[in-house]
Each structure stands twice: as structure tokens, then as C-alpha cells.
Amino acid sequence: MTVMLRNDDMLSDAEIQAARVDLAASFRWFARLGMHEAVANHLSVAVSKDGSKFLMNPRGRHFSRIKASELLLLDSSDQATLKRSDAPDPTAWFIHGRLHALLPEARCVMHLHPTYTTALAGLEDSTMYPIDQNTMRFYDRIATDPDFGGMALANEEGDRLAGLMGKKSILMMGNHGLTVTAPSIAFAFDEMVYFERAAQTLMIAYSTGKKLRLASHEVASITARQWLDYPHLADDHLNEVKAILDAEEPDYRQ
């Protein structure tokens, strides 16, 4: 099924192809890091100027096998999407479709259930406490959803999540996992990797039973700003990932 799109609304063909490659590389690397979950979880990126048209992984495809050409081109305003012969996973559609429709600044949306992050999401207090520079990266940048009510199978659930995020770019989903939004694929990818590393550090610290050594509000705030201002880190990270994949499994670009 072909999605009809206004040419003047779309990014250039070269930009869309670059987005396909970057997103495919992200899938492959998350699989290597063990941050995938069977054939579940989804990454998407807007390819129209208004954010409503986006690429997302097809239903039932393992992260380690995804290729750039296989990413679905979807339109968040197309109510017949789930009737397509190649329809996306319903839970992905109701989350990603609504986030792209309601948060056009969220060019890339990544939703995963990484092990340490999901363990943290299962605690009564899921706060990412500032105990090292990685945890401080996310200081005062996280929205929290304490009201998991089952799988997302309606537009209302996507709308609720978009409302919870507000001006925050990261949503800690209680009893569920993590959603990261960002202005680029590289930045969303880098945020997701670092969030899981930060959660790992925090959960290991909890496992000692010792009291956490918390940074002050001032130090944590400064460090969070420094992370956001650090030049080219996310681009360098994803570029190196693509260089490794180009050497070891270049079919991700196909």
C-alpha cells in the first residue's frame, strides 16, 4: 500500500535515505547491546517538515536484521494504516503515530525496554538520582508516567503520553520502559545508550545497600547543561557505529 504524500512537505530524497540508514544502524547496534526485546519495541523518525510522516520498523522484524529499505513510511493522519497489508504493530502505531502528530519537534522517537532502565521503572521511586556524570546528564530532564494501564491500543494512550512529556524529551514509563524523543536520530540514539548506562550504574549502586552519594542540585544542573552543550558527541557516536557496521554487516544500508 502506498502512502500519498505532498512533495512540498517532505524532506529531500537524499535526506530521507540518510535517515533510513541512520535508523537502521541504530536498530542493529541496539541488538548488539542487548537492548532489543524479541521482535518488539520501535524506533521512528519524521521525514516531513510538519513531523506527521515518519519511518518506523516493520512488524515482526528482529532488530539485528533490519535494513534501511524495510522501514515503513507512515502518515500519522492516515486512519486506515492498521488495515494495510504491511501494517505496523498496533502498539507502535498508537504511541509513535500520536507522538509524531502532537510533538512535531520530536523528530526521532525511540521506545525500548532496556534491562536496567526497565528495572528502575519497576521501582516505586524511579528517579534517576545524580550519582555520576552519566546520571547527571538527565538531571531535571525526565517526565514520569506512573499510570501504566496495559498495552497501548488506542489513540488516547498516545495522546496521554504526549501530554505527560510536555516540554521534556525523555519519558520514564513506570512498569514499562523508556521513550526518548530528540531533534535527530543521532541524539536520540546517544541519549538512549547513555540512559541505559546511567540506569545500570544506579541499579548497581542500589544493590550494595549503601547510601547513595548524591551530587548537589547546582553540580547536577551544571553537568546536565554541559552534556547538552558538548559538541558533536552524538554525531561522532553514531558515525563510529556506522563505520563498524560498514565493516562487519554492511547490509544494514540496503
Image (cartoon, grey):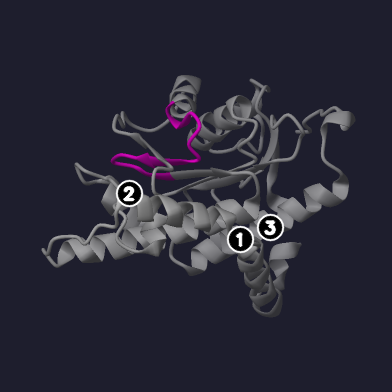
In this view, the residue in front, 179 or 153, is 179
**Classed neighbour count for the residue bearing mark 3: other residues with Cα under 10 Å, few (<14), some (14–19), many (≥20):** many
Of the image marks 3 and 1, the number of the one nearer the N terminus: 3
Quarter of the image for the N terminus: give it: top right
Separation of marks 2 and 3 at Cα, in angstroms: 35 Å
- From the image, tell me which residue sits under label 2: 217
Residue farthest along the front direction in this orientation: 218
Is 23 colored magenta in this rendering? no
Q: Which amino acid does label 3 sit on?
A: Asp
In terms of secondary structure, where does tag 3 sit? Answer: helix
- From the image, tell me which residue sits under label 1: 234
* Nearer mark to the viewer, of 3 and 1: 1
Q: Residue 121: horizontal and vertical position, in percent? A: 29, 46
In terms of secondary structure, where does tag 1 sit? Answer: helix
Q: Examine the rendering and report whether any part of residue 184 can be seen.
A: yes
Q: What residue type is labelled 2?
A: His
Separation of marks 2 and 1 at Cα, in angstroms: 25 Å
Q: Residue at x 21, y 62 (%)?
A: 213
**Classed neighbour count for the residue bearing mark 2: other residues with Cα under 10 Å, few (<14), some (14–19), many (≥20):** few
The magenta region covers 164-178
Quick check: 182 above or below 248? above
Q: Residue 179: horizontal and vertical position, in percent? A: 46, 43
Tell me where residue 178 sits by quadrant. top left
Q: Residue at x 33, y 31 (%)?
A: 150
In terms of secondary structure, where does tag 2 sit? Answer: helix
Q: What residue type is labelled 1?
A: Ala
In this view, the residue in front, 185 or 62, is 185
- From the image, tell me which residue sits under label 3: 22
